[in-house]
Image (cartoon, coloured by chain):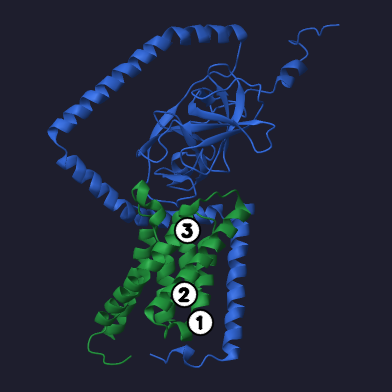
Chain colours: A green, B blue
Amino acid sequence: MSRQREGVLLFWSSLLLGLLLMVIALPEALRPWRPFWLGLLVIYWSLEAPERMGMGRAFGLGLVADVLVGTLAGEHAFRLVAMAFIVLRFRARMRFFPMWQETLAVLAILLNDSLLTLMLRSFVGATVVDWRYWLAPLVAALLWPWWFLMLDDLRRRSRPREASS
Amino acid sequence: MPPSVDSAPLFAEQASGSLRLIGYLALAAALMTADYRSAALVAVRAYAQNLSAPAYWLATAPVRLARSLRDASAERLELVKENAALREQLLRAQAGLTQSGPLQEENSRLRELLDARARLHLQAQLVELVEVDLGLYRHRLLLDLGSASGVAVGQAVMDAHGLIGQVSRADLDHAEVILITDPGHAVPVRVVRNDLRAVAYGSGEVDRLELPYIPFSADIRAGDELVTSGLGGHFPAGIPVATVTQVRGDDSATFAIAEATPNAGLTRGNQVLLLSQIADPPPPPATAADAPASAPEPQP
């Protein structure tokens, strides 16, 4: 039972870390490069452990993010639910992609998310973005292989001496 | 652990997935609408925001650590230099104050003569910023003080150099400030040199304001200082806002647009001044004319 608890610990602490990374202050020059960590987390967990991260939890996580960042209640929830849905729908295929293909799929999901964000914000008021807006999804997609391997490794460590899942 | 549910993706399952997606998206959309259109969620938010205080504390820990490390490791020479620079600044500021003393006296005399009601009493409070990032294109800051300490929506926020923005949401222990550079923000300004009035809109870039719809005949040029005009009653008059950098024709070639750079450091600094609200905005002139006893006889 302890291995399961450790897996749970990893899951929740990764979400907490993702929330913190989202609001942590960066030097001005680095700000456009900040990846959407919560999005990467939702993609990873719904891809690898859909019993842990379904649309319901993505929604809840989004609401917490909305309170933390001060966006309209529901904005992040909307985005993360959409992400979780796409991953869950194509999960069976995505899991057997080679890494580069999976990375491209992640990039597509993140770009879709950026578009969705622009759309949601334009309903509320004027939003002006420049080309740097599209840096963040690119950076996030480039980070994806390492992110994936790191989380996979941590997850494997958290359940020692289990030959097969 | 039960076998994962996706081992045999059936059509029925996919359909129910789509249904749940639609349900969640509709719920999120309803929440956003409620939050945007009505004040129903304000109370909920004010309390929910309280729970995020520890998260803010954790998220700002690296910044605080970096700052204390820098302070601890700063060379003595640097500190001495900084001290000297600050001393000089203080001297200049004091010189400026004494210089403006006679002007202020004269001004107040004139005001008394005019029996003006609205007198500029700026009351300001030094407030710490919570150094978290609220999004690159959102033009927001977070104050470490909320409605529990009397912060109210609409209060002007400035730093030593000029106007930063105004409070757009006040939770119990935090308040959100909308910057003057937000594309949804506008502030009435006047040119110091000749009292030309205009409205400065945020451009969405952190270092640029736009003053559209200026007649080509208007006398405004690069280098002009802009201060708040006090019209509209949102901001006290006379706060420095921006410096005009260039004037060009707009797309329709009917009006000129002036571009200006905000004076305040919108992306740096960790303390700001929160101005207390103007007690009573000057009454519309119509009310004075309505009073029968004191109204002067209209010209025949």
Place residue A106 in its image quadrant. bottom left
Of labels 1 and 2, the one closer to you: 2
The x, y position of residue B118, in whole percent, is 58, 19
| The C terminus of chain A: image quadrant | bottom left
Of A104 and A113, nearer the camera is A104
The x, y position of residue B251, in whole percent, is 65, 38
What residue do we see at 56% from left, 43% from top?
B183
Of callouts 1 and 2, which one flags the residue occurring earlier in the amino acid sequence?
1
B270 versus A33 height, above or below? above
Place residue A36 in its image quadrant. bottom left
Q: Are marks 1 and 2 in contact (CB under 8 Å)?
A: yes
Place residue A141 in its image quadrant. bottom left
Amino acid of disc 3? Trp
Q: Are marks 1 and 3 in contact (CB under 8 Å)?
A: no
Q: Are marks 2 and 3 in contact (CB under 8 Å)?
A: no
Amino acid of disc 1? Phe
Numbered tag placed on residue B206 in the rendering: none
Helix, strand or loop at mark 2 = helix
**In whole angstroms, how far apart are the C-alphas of marks 1 and 2?**
10 Å
